[in-house]
Structures are given as structure tokens and as C-alpha cells.
């Protein structure tokens, strides 16, 4: 049985840990509120952007663009959004497991796919397994701006348009609520899921439709990546908040158990001392 001193040390150490996890939970709550606001405020822009792009692209008549054309798939790109830090429960493991299993199922050779990864956790995961990572970015702020990811988003779109890969899938955690995040797969390129609104808005183009699509479609694809990143950041903070709350609750439960053990051990020691005193007193009579 552990001594009173050992139990007391464990209680003190666990209390310090619970204070740290509680502080991390509060920090995550504050970050989540801002991240959730950022993600929701970006939705109206995305909806309007998609409406405009669909109206122009689907109503362009003979106008075409490489980002709208489905071509034979020789190589697939995967854009994976993870976090830079752990302590977020199953946030990273869920998405990395999904991507890993998908690649194992779809491809026979590393020559058939390429990976673009956002976040240090994902980068370490794929490098450790010798997966072909062609682009990566780490160290993004907790509330990222479009400027923070513009370069990698632009390069990701460029790798598709120059034929490096023939399709691009995006994987991220979609924020449902504070206790639920869903791993989401979205086919980013080619842009084949534009909604065909029968009541299209009529536009007058200057310059031509093709030139407008050359500018608008890459911006639209980049905004999809940014929107997914905002969604993923909200999910990350929610997952970390939940993980730290669970850790705090477990620490408090452990403290209660250790305190009970300490009191029992202390009571046993006092009883033993009283017994020895009484026995000594009886021996002197």
C-alpha cells in the first residue's frame, strides 16, 4: 500500500494537472466562440460566390474552362486539413485514418496520388509513412485570414490546372456542434457540383465570359479551401475544449479517489498509533 506521503504527492500533482487542463479548456472556449463566428460569417459569401459562378459557368454557352472539365484520372490530389498541436481528442486521428484508408483502397502505387497537407500533425503523419507530400503549410494562427493560406490555395489550384493531378479531394472536420465534428470529403476540382439554378441571373460581360471565368473560378476554388479551413478551425477548438473538459473531470475524479485512499490510510495509521499507545500503557500496569 502506498504511503501517506506518496498519496499526498499524487493528489497535489493531479490538482496541478487539473488546473492546467481547466485553463486550456477556458482558452479553447474563447477561441471557439471567435472561430464559430468566423465560419458562420463566411457562409453567405460562399453561397453568393457559388451562385454567381454557377450562373456564369452554366450559362456561358460555348465558353469552357479547364477547371470545369472532367478528364481521365491519372493522378489524384488530396488536400488534408489537420492541426499543428495535439490534445484535441480524436480530431486528427479520425481524419488521418479516413484519408489513409481511402488512399489504401483507391491506389496501388504512390505515383497515383499526391498530398497537400495543412497542419503539422498531418505533415508528420504522412512523412513518417513516406507518402508523397507535394505542398504543406504549418503554423497557421488560430483565427486565420485568407492571406495566411492564399499561397498554398493558389498552388493547389495551379497543380490541377497545369495537369500535375487530374482531380483534387479535400478532407477536413466539419463543425456540427461543440461535441460533434464530422470528417468530410469534398471533391474540390474539377468543379462539377455547381448548382444549376434554372432561374439564372442574366449578366452582361466585359470582357468575355472566358476571361471572367479565368479569374473567377480559381478565386472560387481558393475560397472553398479557406471556408473549409475556417470550419476545421472551429472543429479543432471544439474538440480541444471537449478533450480538456474530459481531462479535468477525470482529474477531479482521481483526486476524489486519492483523497478517499489518503483518509483511509491516515485513519488506519491513527488507529495503529492508538492501539500501540494502549498496548504500551497496559504493559506498564
Image (spheres, rainbow, N blue to C red):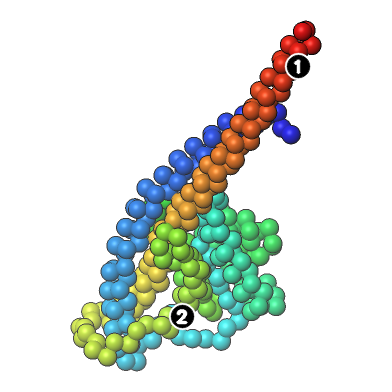
Measuring 46% from the left and 80% from the top, which residue is drawn there? 190
Task: Give the x, y percent position of residue 212.
Answer: 30, 77
Left of 184 or right of it: where is 270? right
Left of 123 or right of it: where is 171? left
- Residue on which the image places disc 1: 279
Measuring 35% from the left and 61% from the top, which residue is drawn there? 39
Badge 2: few (under 14), some or many (20 or more) residues near its Cα, within 10 Å? many
Please name whichever residue, 185 or 135, is drawn nearer the observer in this view of the structure. 185
Badge 1: few (under 14), some or many (20 or more) residues near its Cα, within 10 Å? few
Task: Give the x, y percent position of residue 145.
Answer: 37, 55
In the rendered image, which quarter contains the N terminus? Answer: top right
In the rendered image, which quarter contains the C terminus? Answer: top right
Where residue 62 sits, quadrant-wise, is bottom left
Please name whichever residue, 48 or 270, is drawn nearer the observer in this view of the structure. 270
Q: How many labels does the image show?
A: 2
Judged by depth in the image, the label closer to the viewer, 1 or 2, is 1
Which circle marks residue 161 in the picture? none
Please name whichever residue, 36 or 11, is drawn nearer the observer in this view of the structure. 11
Measuring 58% from the left and 35% from the top, which residue is drawn there? 259
Q: Indicate whether 62 appears above or below 191.
A: below
- Residue on which the image places disc 2: 190
Q: Can residue 196 be seen in this view?
A: yes
Is tag 1's residue or tag 2's residue first in the polypeptide sequence? 2
Left of 211 or right of it: where is 25? right
Task: Give the x, y percent position of residue 30.
Answer: 37, 47
Alpha carbon separation for disc pair 1 and 2: 89 Å
Q: For the residue labelled by badge 2, is the local secondary structure a helix, a strand or a loop?
A: loop
Q: Indicate whether 238 appears above or below 280.
A: below
Amino acid at each position: 500500500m502506498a504511503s501517506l506521503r506518496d498519496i499526498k504527492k499524487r493528489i497535489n500533482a493531479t490538482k496541478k494537472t487539473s488546473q492546467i487542463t481547466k485553463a486550456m479548456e477556458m482558452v479553447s472556449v474563447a477561441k471557439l466562440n471567435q472561430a464559430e463566428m468566423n465560419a458562420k460569417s463566411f457562409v453567405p459569401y460562399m453561397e453568393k460566390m457559388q451562385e454567381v459562378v454557377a450562373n456564369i459557368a452554366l450559362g456561358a454557352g460555348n465558353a469552357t474552362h479547364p477547371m470545369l472539365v472532367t478528364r481521365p484520372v491519372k493522378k489524384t490530389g488530396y488536400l488534408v486539413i489537420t492541426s499543428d498541436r495535439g490534445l484535441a481528442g480524436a480530431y486528427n486521428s479520425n481524419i488521418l485514418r479516413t484519408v489513409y484508408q481511402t488512399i489504401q483502397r483507391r491506389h496501388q502505387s504512390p505515383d497515383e496520388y499526391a498530398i497537400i497537407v495543412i497542419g503539422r500533425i498531418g505533415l508528420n503523419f504522412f512523412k513518417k509513412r513516406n507518402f508523397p507530400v507535394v505542398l504543406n503549410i504549418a503554423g497557421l494562427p488560430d483565427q486565420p485570414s485568407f492571406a495566411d493560406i492564399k499561397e498554398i490555395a493558389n498552388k493547389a489550384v495551379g497543380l490541377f490546372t497545369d495537369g500535375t493531378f487530374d482531380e483534387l479531394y479535400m478532407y477536413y472536420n466539419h463543425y456540427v456542434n461543440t461535441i460533434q465534428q464530422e470528417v468530410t470529403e469534398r471533391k474540390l476540382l474539377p468543379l462539377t457540383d455547381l448548382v444549376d439554378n434554372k432561374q439564372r441571373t442574366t449578366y452582361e460581360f466585359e470582357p468575355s465570359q472566358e476571361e471572367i471565368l479565368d479569374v473567377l473560378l480559381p478565386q472560387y476554388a481558393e475560397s472553398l479551401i479557406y471556408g473549409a479551413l475556417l470550419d476545421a478551425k472551429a472543429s479543432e477548438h471544439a474538440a480541444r475544449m471537449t478533450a480538456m473538459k474530459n481531462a479535468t473531470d477525470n482529474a477531479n475524479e482521481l483526486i476524489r479517489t486519492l483523497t478517499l485512499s489518503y483518509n483511509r490510510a491516515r485513519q488506519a495509521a491513527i488507529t495503529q498509533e492508538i492501539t500501540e499507545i494502549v498496548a504500551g500503557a497496559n504493559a506498564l500496569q
